[in-house]
Amino acid sequence: MNRAKTSPPPKRTYNQTARAEAAEATAERIVEVFYGFMTDDWYDNVSLEKVAKAAGVTVPTVLRRFGSKEGLLEATKEKMEREVEARRTVKPGDVTAAVDAIVNDYEAAAGIMLRILAQEDRLSVLKELTDYGRKQHREWVELAFAPQLEGLKPAGREWTLDGLIAALDIYVWKVLRIDRGRTPAEVARHMRNLVRGILEGR
């Protein structure tokens, strides 16, 4: 009796998939290492050699994936954007949820945010990143407080929006959390009071 021949498993496809997954994991590790350096050191001091060594790869590997240090910074920006969006997802109009979300966001990422802000006047590549962050923050405030802003005349809407953006700014968090040593819950309480004062006084 002739037995039907069975096809060998698609090893090539499997190997290609495994290699792609390994390459992606390596890229993520490189970005994480760069993110860590950017949190604790100045941009000028973070060399590709340091990043490659800490990530367990070679500089050519970093360059093949990201092209340059600026390309690695762009990948880091995309990582931050995804994480900020996830941490700040709230139902529009919920003041408590919005304040809690932004305090949690700053608790998670204020280190790198403040470090980059401290260098923006000196490095144009970082100024582009901080300008983007301000735009992202403004858009989030508009969305998070859309019900409260709805129906306001243009001038009044901009006035209220400016106040909300300032009340929820990272430097307000820094003054309360770092300079004054307040707990996250206390920071959130102060920010809620600021936000409600702005909304009530518009």
Image (cartoon, rainbow, N blue to C red):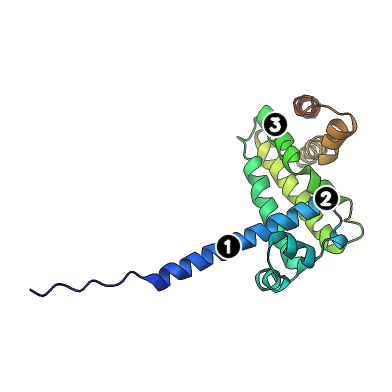
Residue drawn at (70%, 72%) of the image: 63
Three-letter code for the amino acid on which mark 2 is drawn? Asp
Please tell me how crowded label 3 is: few (under 14), some (14-19), or many (20+) other residues with Cα within 10 Å. many
Kind of residue at disc 3: Asp
When asked about the image quadrant of residue 52, the answer is bottom right
The residue under label 3 is 100
Give the side of residue 48 with respect to residue 75, left or right: right
| Residue 171 shows up from this direction | yes
Reading the chain from its start, which is encountered first: label 1 or label 3?
Answer: 1
Residue 182, image x, y percentages: 83, 27
Picture residue at 63% right of the left edge, 35% below the top: 92
Query: Where is mark 2, residue-wise?
Result: 40
Answer above or below: position of 121 versus 165: below
Percent x, y for residue 103?
74, 34
- At mark 1, the secondary structure is helix
Mark 1 near mark 3, Cβ–Cβ under 8 Å?
A: no
* Image-quadrant location for residue 195: top right
Rendered residue at 65%/32% (across/down): 93
| Residue that label 1 marks | 24
**Residue drawn at 68 percent across, 35 percent down:** 101
Looking at the picture, does residue 101 appear above or below residue 4? above
Q: Secondary structure at mark 2?
A: helix
Using the image, tell me which numbered label, if any, was put on residue 190.
none
